[in-house]
Amino acid sequence: MATILKHGTLLTASETFQADLLIEGETIAKIGADLQYPNAEVIDATGKLILPGGVDPHVHLDLPMFGTVSSDDHYTGHKAAAFGGTTTVMDFVVLEEKGFQYSVDIWMKMAEKAAIDYSFHMNLTKFNAVIAKEIPSLREMGITTLKVFTAYNGRLRLDDGSIFRALQIARDNGMLVMAHCENGDVIETLTEQALAAGHTTPEWHALTRPAWGAVESLLRLAGMASAADAAVYIVHMNTAGEVDMLKYARERGVKVMGETCPQYLFFTVDDLRRPDGAKWICSPPMRTKEDNARLWEGLSQGILQTIGTDHCPFFFDGTKPIVYEGREVAIPGKELGRDDFTKIPNGLPGIQDRMPVLWTTGVRTGKITANQFVAYMSTNPAKIFGLYPRKGALLEGSDADIVIWDPEKKVKYGVAMSHQRTDYNLYEDWELTGYPEKVFLRGQLIVDGSEWKGKQGMGRFLKRGEGEVI
Ligand code: URP
Ligand code: ZN
Ligand code: ZN
């Protein structure tokens, strides 16, 4: 079975050019002028852009939290991702007492319903001699990344000594440490004080997690990475100071890379002050307009490397069902913290929103170029996480994960258009120009306009190798 995309404009992280593209089976077979192939289906892509499928390096599907679970599973989240142009996602395995293999098996089981390709990072939330010895076994499982936390005291956080050891072990085994940077001690103290003073509303989630904690934590991680001669990837960067510190460290040769997420480019602590402020609760929190602007600069100037979503949706009101694929679904959500911000599940939706929202707000406004868009959304995460050039590339031999992007398509975006399984969308009523028209996963058409052609179980686990430091 072959398909030729004719007369489109190919858009990669470094080039924009006119060519036909031949898909044969699961891969890109040829790129060139006037391609012919016997009995191939021909799709006319005149006026359209051809992009490599998006690679979202940061999602949380089926994540248990605060007595509930993130409301997209490994099928619904994948389907939503595909409608937004993303064909590969990376989730985080929760580390259980019984060790790495046991924990990975749980995630593998949940992901049997995968609809797009996926891989896993391991949350390194405990550290001792046994765990240290077992880290290299993750490599054989195709999991080459470890997420560490400098926050969530008593739950997920590791002390600096353990993080430093993890960096050394990662360095010695071709692995990469990813870091959630906030100051856990400051957060713990401020939260206790806020609750004691009777402050229970959503804005206190942000007020108890100061930006300087993220800034000093990022610099601390960069310092430790430098001392270990290891690389580190900073997840969900959200403050201006972090961009400054990333630049500072990179200019001094530290192997540090940074990810931001769409929500940190648009929203502020003021959104948490709205009557429905719980919708914007995630960690780290929304900051200020100045932070939004500096993160945009970080993207324009190439200081940052990727845009992930940190997709971790919860219902705003999980007592009221929504209809998803013809069935009523209600999953407890943000209402759990109606009287106490510390009980609001942390996280928000975004897996489908990422590429369409960033095309309109980034590329069309000139804040980033179309090639930077491809780099941040697809090629850079594929390179950093050891999937390039199988993913993130329009090259002969690469997986035919392809988006036909209509740069002129106008949509009024929001929950009605979204396949994210939750009852709200952060970009409700935003007017977007530019949207995926067709999406292919390994040569198979999975999204055709508003029609879903994918299915549960067609997504494959991707064993990852060593990534690049870019
Ligand atoms: O609030 C968030 N981001 N929840 C997911 C967990 C994390 O730290 O990324
Ligand atoms: Zn995190
Ligand atoms: Zn996350």
Image (cartoon, rainbow, N blue to C red):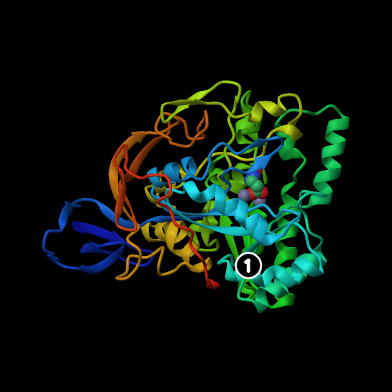
Q: Is residue 420 above or below residue 241?
A: above
Residue type pointed to by label 1: Leu
Q: Which residue is mark 1?
A: 138
Quarter placement of the N terminus: bottom left
Q: Is residue 173 above or below residue 98?
A: below
- Crowd band around label 1 with a 10 angstrom C-alpha radius: few (<14), some (14–19), many (20+): some
Left or right: 345 with respect to 458?
A: right
Q: Residue at x 31, y 37 (%)?
A: 450
Residue 150 % position (x, y): 76, 56
Residues 248 and 217: in front is 217
Residue 288 picture quarter = top right
Residues 59 and 237: in front is 59
Left or right: 166 with respect to 55?
A: right
Q: Residue at x 56, y 54 (%)?
A: 108
Residue 410 picture quarter = top left
Q: Residue at x 28, y 46 (%)?
A: 406
Residue 449 % position (x, y): 29, 40
Residue 42 % position (x, y): 15, 54
SS class, disc 1:
helix
Total tally of numbered discs in the picture: 1
Residue 99 picture quarter = bottom right
Left or right: 23 with respect to 165?
A: left
Residues 263 and 298: in front is 263
Left or right: 13 with respect to 300?
A: left
Q: Is residue 327 above or below residue 58?
A: above
Can residue 203 be seen here? yes
Residue 457 % position (x, y): 43, 49
Can residue 243 be seen here? no
Residues 57 and 429: in front is 57
Q: Residue furthest top?
A: 320
